[in-house]
Amino acid sequence: MARKQSKAGTKLTHIDSKGEARMVDVSAKPATERVAVAEGCVVMSKATLDLIVKGDAAKGDVLGTARIAGIMAAKRTSELIPLCHPLALSKVTLDITPDASLPGCRLRATVKVTGPTGVEMEALTAVSVGCLTVYDMIKAVERGVRIEGIHLVEKLGGKSGHYRAPKSRSGK
């Protein structure tokens, strides 16, 4: 079976010539600085957002807990995503901003490494787990919370160079 191709015509790197999943060999790639930024949001009622902002959630500091959870998750991405390489991350930040226009919280992770492979999965994992943690912290007061729009915003470094996601229709 030939190597699988995406719509863009590039080869899927985690599929071998037999169509089987494999970990990519990055041993010959140079170690370069790589950065990835990912975003997502947690949409909730205004009343629930007010609880978070006031610090009145029953389980405690929602934003601080979600921030730590996201950072910890980024560091453990290779344990969660089977074909990811374990990386010695040099930076992980997870910024969480309450946004009354949603209403809800916007999460933005920035991850950095100097190594032979990128950190997109680590940034996406940080945002995903951060969003899940916000949900866990507030589910007792609102079960209808939605996690939305988790995506890679930007990546820098590596052979493929700079990528920046197109702006969404909402401009956010």
Image (spheres, grey):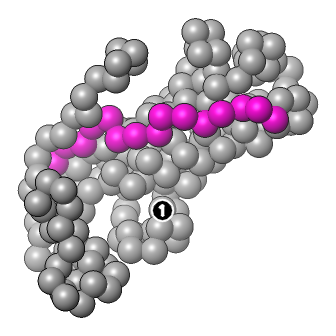
> From what the image shows, is residue 6 above or below residue 95?
below
Quadrant in which the C terminus appears: top left
In the rendered view, does 130 fall on the left or right side of 82? right
For the point 59% across and 48% down, the residue is 129
Q: Quadrant of residue 19?
A: bottom left
Q: Is residue 151 magenta?
A: yes
- Asked whether residue 57 is in view, the answer is yes
In the rendered view, does 78 fall on the left or right side of 130? left
- Asked whether residue 65 is in view, the answer is no
Q: Which stretch appears magenta?
A: 143-157
> From what the image shows, is residue 58 above or below residue 75?
above
In the rendered view, does 3 fall on the left or right side of 44? left
For the point 40% across and 40% down, the residue is 151
Residue identified by numbered label 1: 77
| Residue 88 on image: x %, y % | 37, 62
For the point 12% across and 62% down, the residue is 10
